[in-house]
């Protein structure tokens, strides 16, 4: 049985927020808003995260006004 991989939709959420607010949102802006480093947000955008921290997930959900399920999902199609 293939194991599912935990993935995120951060890039999609950034794009949606840009569309709603009709402005560009940088990774640095997101990082500052959620008290994270630009490197961390970049890792999220690339789906290169291996450690998911609850407090950061909570801050991202608050910033994007979304639920955890809108941010994270199990990807069964690209399981390694």
Image (cartoon, rainbow, N blue to C red):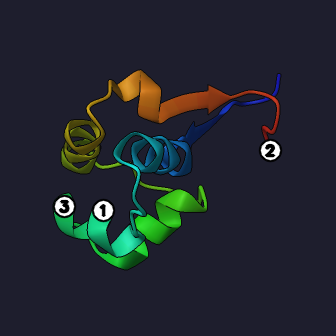
**Residue identifier under label 3:** 33
- Residue 17 placement, left or right of 49: left
Q: Nearer the viewer, residue 6 or 27?
A: 27
Give the residue at x 23% y 44%: 63
Residue at 30%, 62% (x, y): give it.
30
Say what secondary structure mark 2 lies in.
Answer: loop
User: In the depicted view, which residue is nearer to us: 73 or 19?
Assistant: 19
Mark 1 lies on a secondary structure that is helix
Pointer 2 residue = 80
Whichever of labels 3 and 2 marks the residue nearer the N terminus, that label is: 3
Tell me the distance, in whole angstroms, between the alpha carbons under discs 1 and 2.
30 Å
Q: Are marks 3 and 1 in contact (CB under 8 Å)?
A: yes
Q: CA distance from mark 3 to mark 1?
A: 5 Å
Q: Residues within 10 Å of mark 2 (few under 14, many from 20)?
A: few
Q: Which residue lies at the image location 35% right of the left edge and 27% below the top edge?
A: 68
Q: Residue furthest front?
A: 22
| Image mark for residue 57 | none
Residue indicated by mark 1: 30
Residue 35 visible to the viewer: no
């Amino acid at each position: 049985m293939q194991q599912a991989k935990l993935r995120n939709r951060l890039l999609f959420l950034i794009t949606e927020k840009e569309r709603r607010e009709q402005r560009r949102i940088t990774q640095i802006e997101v990082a500052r808003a959620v008290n994270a480093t630009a490197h961390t947000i970049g890792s999220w955008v690339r789906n290169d995260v291996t450690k998911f921290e609850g407090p950061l997930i909570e801050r991202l959900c608050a910033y994007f006004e979304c639920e955890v399920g809108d941010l994270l999902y199990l990807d069964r199609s690209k399981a390694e």
